[in-house]
Image (cartoon, rainbow, N blue to C red):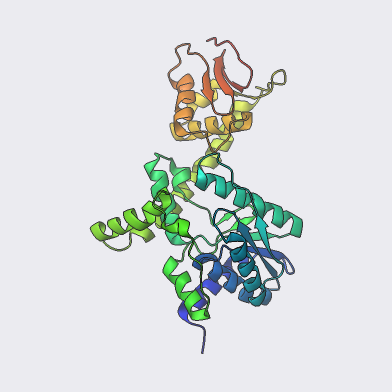
Amino acid sequence: MGPPPAVADVRRAVRHALGDLAPGSLVLVACSGGADSLALAAATGFAAPRAGLRAGLVTVDHGLQEGSAARAADVVRLAHALGLDPAEAAAVHVGTAGGPEAAAREARYGALAEAAGRLGAAAVLLGHTRDDQAETVLLRLARGSGTRSLAGMPARAGLYRRPFLELGRRTTAAACAALGLAPWEDPHNLDDRYARVRVRRRLLPALEEELGPGVTEALARTASLCRDDADALDGWADEVYARAAAGCALSDIGGVALAVPELEKAPAAVRRRVLRRAAVEAGSPPGTLAAGHVLRIDSLVTGWRGQRRVEVPGGIGVVRRYGTLVFARQPASPAS
């Protein structure tokens, strides 16, 4: 007799996510103790050894709640019982930049990257589910994001892998129940001060009630379709960027320079990707560089009337000088 369906589903998802790793590689599970990451830890503890891999766990103690250190220690003890070794807790300091959710996320990923580098891990597994993907799409849609943002979270991004993006929370909860695991419910997941919590507890249920079942699956499917489109447009933008940057080096002041005639030939969706990339490479933080900033830069190409420099986050200024768009920290005088 095989395992219960939910257990089989989570194990299958993990096996698929680990399929290309070299034998003997170490894979780490990021585990908070919630149902999603707990099911991921159990499935990885089962599947990794059978694939010839080593499996470990990292739990991040954000220090935001009383007793968090004790809960982290409990997760580490459970990890050993699930066959995950090494297993460790990483205590972090959560700052305030970007708001509490963004600050906690930055601290968490910093701790995961440090642990992975120190332990020599080939991959870090994250427990995001299809429900998390749907919430991400709605949040970014409300902010007026483009197709790259609406593509949601990728199944793979560098070191990180998300095996459960095609599974729902009901599956991870059912897997935990079948395996006799007791997930911890983070009180922050019930706090309506957080936008994601409001989407989860209010907006998605309202959409399901008004539009019928399947909204979560449809939003996740939208993310997948947007990702295909965004990948194609990004590839096109790479070609335009290379042509626009050719012969426009700025060795005297640093920064990035792009030939306006090449930008003018590109469709808006491609051109704005090129402009965003140039701003980031010049030093603008991608997390604070908004669509509105890119649109103002774009006006230097499409609506040129001798405008002054456009300021973007990171102290970067963008000016048009003699048919060249210049992205740099140093001020420059605009000219046609």
User: Can residue 231 be seen from the camera position used here?
Assistant: no
Answer left or right for 35 relative to 247: left
Percent position of residue 67, x then y: 57, 61
Q: Residue furthest front?
A: 66
Residue reaching furthest to the bottom? 1
Q: Residue sitting at 33 percent across and 58 percent down? A: 215
Q: Is residue 1 above or below residue 261?
A: below
Give coordinates of residue 276: x percent, y percent. 53, 32
The answer to which quarter of the image holds residue 281 is top right
Closest to the observer: 103 or 240? 103
For the image, the number of numbered tags is 0
Give how far across and how far down residue 105 sits, in percent: 56, 49
Residue displayed at 59% across by 27% down:
244
Question: Is residue 88 shown to the viewer in this render?
Answer: yes
Q: Please tell me whether residue 111 is drawn above or below residue 75 in the rendered image.
A: above
- Which residue is outermost to the left? 210
Please determine whether, in this image, residue 115 is positioned above or below residue 321. Answer: below
The answer to which quarter of the image holds residue 163 is bottom right
The percent coordinates of residue 335 (x first, y second) are 54, 9
Residue sitting at x 65%, y 26%: 246
